[in-house]
Image (cartoon, helix red, strand yellow):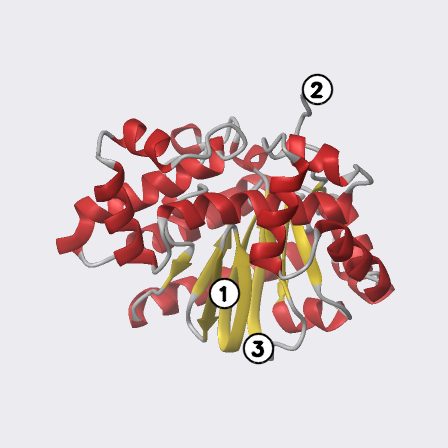
Amino acid sequence: MEYSDPIRVYSTRAFTGRFMPSLQLAAALKSDFGKFFVIRVEDMYRHVHHDVPASRSYNHSCLFLTSGRATMQIGNSTYSIKGNELLFVPAGQVFSFRTGDVNEGYLCHFHNDLFVNRISKKESLEGFAFLRARGNPVVKPGVQAVAFITAIFNRLLQEYTENGLKDVEMIAAWLMAFLCEANRAYVATDPFHMPAMHIVNRFKELVYLHFKTKHLVKEYADMLHVTPNHLNKIIKRDTGRSAGKWIDEAIILDAKAMLYQTRLSVNEIASATGLHDPSYFTRLFKKYEGITPAAYRKMIETSGT
């Protein structure tokens, strides 16, 4: 039996209602906040009272800190940022985070549709690597860029607070200006290592797209036109984890989200991740998480999250 992706993808309204059920927060967000909103981080995350487990959203998110620190798991990796740094979560990417971070700054949440028929050159936002499921979602702007980005966020926040999306063209224009500033500041790695980083980024993207059907390093090496040994060497050197571990962790991350968000049986979840041997799936899950899938689900249910 084949399964479509059963992980719940949250709309903005469903996500805030599930994890941030606050009348005060609801009053700060406009009626059409499913398409776009911007808010101060300190005004939003104080309403988050428990950890957010593996989830997905229809929208892109960007966290811009002016002080403090923030840590989030995006895909298979954990990222931390501090003041004057940006962290992007592409639409559809699995993410999770814990409570306890102390920080200030801005959170921006937006859908691709905001740009359709307004700024045709970038309407799909494909030009921005940090909005795709590949590469490094952390952007560290220089001093001048930070000043520009701060000014743009202040202007976006003022416009949104006073007028919501009454003037969508203005919101889209300011948001595009921000994305262009972020893109200019975006540096994935040292330029001298760009060929290897291209392989690393492309490998991550391919794993994100194919981990349910392709489980062998050789399959990804073939798609990248390199040998399995060369691919493993590059991935291990640049990420600290082997190519095989990246594939395994993508499967486990997907399974964790399904265990939390669905009522599929463990056997059904194994099939949905492409592992049709439930015993092997359980062994793999326990190898990485230290407990069985059934125990993990029970732990989540017991925690009340």
Going by the image, does 305 lie left or right of 174?
Answer: right
Q: Which residue is mark 2?
A: 1
CA gap between label 2 and label 3 equals 46 Å
Q: Residue at position x 65%, y 73% from top?
A: 42
The x and y percentages for residue 34 are 70, 43
Q: Which residue is mark 1?
A: 64
- Which label's residue is closer to the chain start, 2 or 3? 2
Q: Residues within 10 Å of mark 2 (few under 14, many from 20)?
A: few
The x and y percentages for residue 31 are 78, 46
> CB under 8 Å between callouts 1 and 3?
no
Number of numbered discs visible in the structure rendering: 3
Instruction: From the viewer's side, name the closer residue of 289 and 118.
Output: 289
Q: Which residue is mark 3?
A: 103
For the residue labelled by badge 2, is the local secondary structure a helix, a strand or a loop? loop
Q: Is residue 31 visible?
A: no
The x and y percentages for residue 132 are 44, 41
Instruction: From the viewer's side, name the closer residue of 279 and 48.
Output: 279
